[in-house]
Structures are given as structure tokens and as C-alpha cells.
Image (spheres, helix red, strand yellow):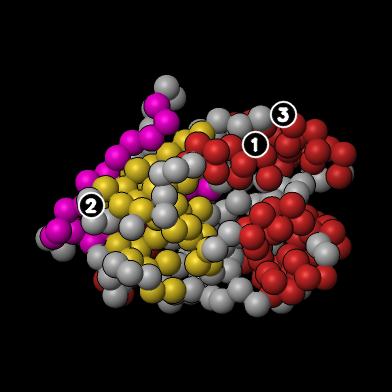
């Protein structure tokens, strides 16, 4: 079974379409690690698209805030403004769909999905010291997580935590990780709609665990068209600018 693993789409329909086009014919089952909405200009389009997929999905913090399930008081002012705008834009059925998304962790065949971390769906795992709990808690050899928008991940091998540097180069579409039987993995596909690791291309993963292969993909998309829509919607300028830098 080949899995297409999406995370942090963040209401960016153009990035999602580019990723789906690049991945076409390369996967059998799709999973999503949450944050379907927030930050981007296309909440209804993206929710419509994801709802039509036969997808295994868990919620992210922006799905809770955008649907109104959680207030956005712990968001920074810019993120909060967009969460409230998103809530306003969403059609009722899309808001309800977001509201009923399950919290992680969600166990799949051979791996587990979380949005942030095992103990707290909203926790950010940026560094090895933060990864160790999730690596030790993991009920499966491989956990896929999102939330940080940083493609890559962490390993636990011989009681040592390692950092994986797997981002494909500027001229490459993907780089491949070979899964080692004696290692536990915490892997982040990166963000479709708002990358923050310095590469503005849409990020995702294609995993074939029978072949012990995990591909970390980056696909270019028309960033300017998304920035224009964000401007038309009156979304905050810093969010518009950061798409071009992938920061
Ligand atoms: Zn996110």
C-alpha cells in the first residue's frame, strides 16, 4: 500500500492541486494530519476537495479554531484574525465537517498519525529534546506528525535521537528515506499550504512501507496567484509575504 501523506494544507487550493497533480498515479490511500484551513484564502474550496477524498484524517489546531470548536485566544493576532475570517467564510456543512474531525493519535496499518505530538495534539516538536517523548511513546515504528511545517523528522536508534535532513534539493522533486528495521521514526511530510523551512514549494510524503521507502516531495506552485487572492480577501500582509519565502 502506498500512502500519500498530506499535512497543513491551510486553505491553499493552488498548492493542494499542484501536489495532487504531481502525486497522481503514485499512491493508493491518502491520509491528512490536520490543519486543512487557516492562513489561506480558499477554506471552502479546500474543505470541499478534501471531503471528496477517501481520506483518513485527524484535526489540527486551525481546524478547531476555524470551525469554532475552540476559541483562537492562544493564537497570535495574525493567526487569530484569519481564524475568525475563516469561520465567517465557511459554509455550514464545511464548518460542521471540520468540527467533527477526530483528534489524533490515529493508528493505521504499520504507522500512527498525530497532528502535533502523542500526549498533546497541539504540541510543537521542533527539536530532538521535544521529539524524545513521542519517539519513546510511539506504539508503532513510524509516526507521521505535522504542525511545525518543517519537512524532515527524528529517529531513535540505540537510545540516541537523531535529526533527519531529507528536504530535496532545489532541482529535485523528492528525496528518499530507506526505513531501517532497528530505528523508530517521527516523520513530518512538511506543509502543503504554508511551508516554513525555507523552501516555498508545497511539501508532502509518499510512503511505501512494504518497500521501506518514504519519499519527501517538494512541488512548485503558482504562489503569486494565491497571494493575489489573499490580498483580495484582505488577509494580513505578513501571511501574504511569507508564502514567497517559505518562512
Ligand atoms: Zn499548521
Q: Earlier in the sequence, mark 1 or mark 3?
A: 3
Residue depth check, mark 3 versus mark 2: number of the one nearer the observer: 2
Magenta highlight on residue 184: yes
Span of residues in magenta: 172-191
Q: Where is residue 195, by image quadrant?
A: top right
Please tell me which residue lies in front, 84 or 30. 30
- Label 3 CB-ligand 1 distance < 8 A: no
The residue identified by callout 2 is 212
Height in image: 151 above or below 75? above
Q: Which mark is residue 243?
A: 1
Q: How far apart are the two marked residues, 3 and 2, measured between alpha carbons?
A: 37 Å
Please tell me which residue lies in front, 109 or 38. 109
Neighbor class of circle 1 (other Cα within 10 Å; few <14, some 14-19, many 20+) is many
Q: Position of residue 23 (x, y in %)?
A: 47, 41
Under circle 2, the secondary element is: loop
Magenta highlight on residue 142: no
Q: How far apart are the two marked residues, 1 and 3, measured between alpha carbons?
A: 9 Å
Amino acid at each position: 500500500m502506498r500512502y500519500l501523506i498530506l499535512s497543513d494544507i491551510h486553505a491553499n487550493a493552488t498548492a493542494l492541486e499542484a501536489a495532487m497533480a504531481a502525486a497522481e498515479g503514485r499512491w493508493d490511500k491518502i491520509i491528512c494530519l490536520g490543519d486543512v484551513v487557516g492562513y489561506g484564502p480558499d477554506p471552502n474550496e479546500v474543505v470541499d476537495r478534501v471531503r471528496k477524498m477517501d481520506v483518513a484524517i485527524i484535526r489540527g489546531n486551525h481546524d478547531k479554531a476555524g470551525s469554532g470548536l475552540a476559541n483562537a485566544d492562544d493564537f497570535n493576532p495574525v493567526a487569530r484574525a484569519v481564524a475568525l475570517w475563516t469561520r465567517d467564510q465557511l459554509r455550514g456543512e464545511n464548518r460542521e465537517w471540520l468540527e467533527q474531525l477526530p483528534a489524533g493519535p490515529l493508528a493505521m496499518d504499520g504507522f500512527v498519525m498525530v497532528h502535533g505530538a502523542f500526549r498533546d495534539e497541539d504540541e510543537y516538536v521542533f527539536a530532538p529534546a521535544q521529539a524524545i517523548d513521542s519517539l519513546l511513546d510511539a506504539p508503532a515504528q513510524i509516526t507521521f506528525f505535522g504542525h511545525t511545517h518543517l519537512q524532515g523528522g527524528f529517529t531513535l536508534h540505540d537510545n540516541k535521537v537523531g535529526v533527519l535532513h531529507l528536504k530535496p534539493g532545489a532541482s529535485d522533486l523528492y528525496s528518499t528515506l530507506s526505513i531501517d528495521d532497528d530505528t523508530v521514526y517521527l516523520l513530518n511530510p512538511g506543509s502543503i499550504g504554508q511551508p516554513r523551512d525555507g523552501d516555498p514549494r508545497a511539501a508532502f510524503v509518499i510512503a511505501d512501507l512494504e518497500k521501506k521507502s518514504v519519499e519527501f516531495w517538494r512541488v512548485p506552485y503558482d504562489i503569486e496567484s494565491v497571494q493575489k487572492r489573499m490580498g483580495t480577501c484582505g488577509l494580513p500582509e505578513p501571511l501574504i509575504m511569507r508564502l514567497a519565502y517559505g518562512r
